[in-house]
Amino acid sequence: MLRSINSSRARKLHQAFIYKGWEEKDVFSVVGENIIRQAVNAGIVTELLYVNDCPIPFVKKTKVTPEVMAYISRGKEDSMVAICKKAEIPIPSGELHRILVLDKVTYRANIGRIMNLAFSFGVDLVYYSEGDGTNYHARSIVKTSQGASLFLPALPAVLPEKLRELRAEGWYVVGTSLRDAVPMSGIAARDKMVFVVGNEHFGVSEEVLQETDVNCRIEMENNDSLNVAVAAGILLHRFRI
């Protein structure tokens, strides 16, 4: 049992709850029984910490005092947490059919919802803007994605270059923009499709739109704009395999 907040071990565990410097860290934390179970299934959990009870089968479990849990989790959790190792999620073997691109989507809640929808509707791979500062291991993203982000590979990329590369490989790139847009119902499904959604305030950037094959608009009444996660969900459901 871990009892002291002054121990070197407690201080090390505490680091898994701090976002600062996350790029260099090799560990992160997840909370919530369902999410922890998924993290265990994903094979990334190194240790479970709990105060009173731990219903999840796992070899390395450590009971801690409420005081230690409050210190480790910075006062945000008080029952059970999992310490996880950063692990690169492998790109699915075999042929890919659906890729999602996030162009400077910044709100963690939106990213989490989008990851959940992408995983639910058969997306094989996600690319996001290189250097946008988003931590895809953030607890809020893992939680909002309902654990989907633990299984869906997401890779940083210079998006215009990546889209040019994908188009050269035969992918059909669908952007989301009202400019020169085709109604979603007028776009035929293809075997290899890339869908691009953009920043919450500015949409898909001009340099990225230059690399799309078609721009899509979702047919609506009384409105011409949707939350990026909602729009992504509609688009991905329409073209799911």
Image (tube, rainbow, N blue to C red):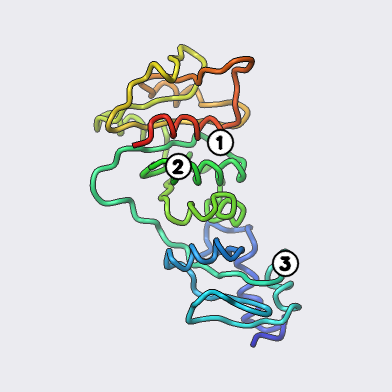
Q: Are marks 3 and 2 in contact (CB under 8 Å)?
A: no
* For discs 3 and 1, the disc positioned in front in the rendered view: 1
- Residue plotted at (39% across, 56% down): 89
- The residue beneath circle 1 is 229
User: Measured along the vertical axis of the image, is residue 160 above or below residue 26?
Assistant: above
Q: Mark 3 belongs to which amino acid? A: Arg
Viewer-side residue, 49 vs 34: 34
Residue 98, image x, y percentages: 35, 37
Q: CA distance from mark 3 to mark 1?
A: 30 Å
Question: Which sits earlier in the primary sequence, circle 3 or circle 1?
Answer: 3
Name which quarter of the figure residue 196 lies in. top left
Residues at discs 2 and 1 in contact (Cβ within 8 Å):
no
Question: Could you say which is closer to the camera, residue 175 or residue 119?
Answer: 119
Q: Residues within 10 Å of mark 3 (few under 14, many from 20)?
A: some
The amino acid type found where label 1 is placed reads Ala
Q: CA distance from mark 2 to mark 1?
A: 10 Å
Q: Quadrant of the C terminus?
A: top left
**Horizontal placement of 19 versus 137: left or right?**
right
Dot 3: element? loop
In the image, what residue type sits under mark 2?
Ala
Judged from this view, the residue extending furthest toward the top is 180
Quarter of the image where one finds residue 73: bottom right
Q: Which mark is residue 118?
A: 2
Nearer the N terminus, badge 3 or badge 2? 3
Image position, residue 21 (x, y; %): 59, 58
**Which residue is the site of mark 3?**
74
Q: Secondary structure at mark 1?
A: helix
Which residue is nearer to you in this view: 213 or 216?
216
Which residue sits at x=62%, y=17%? 223
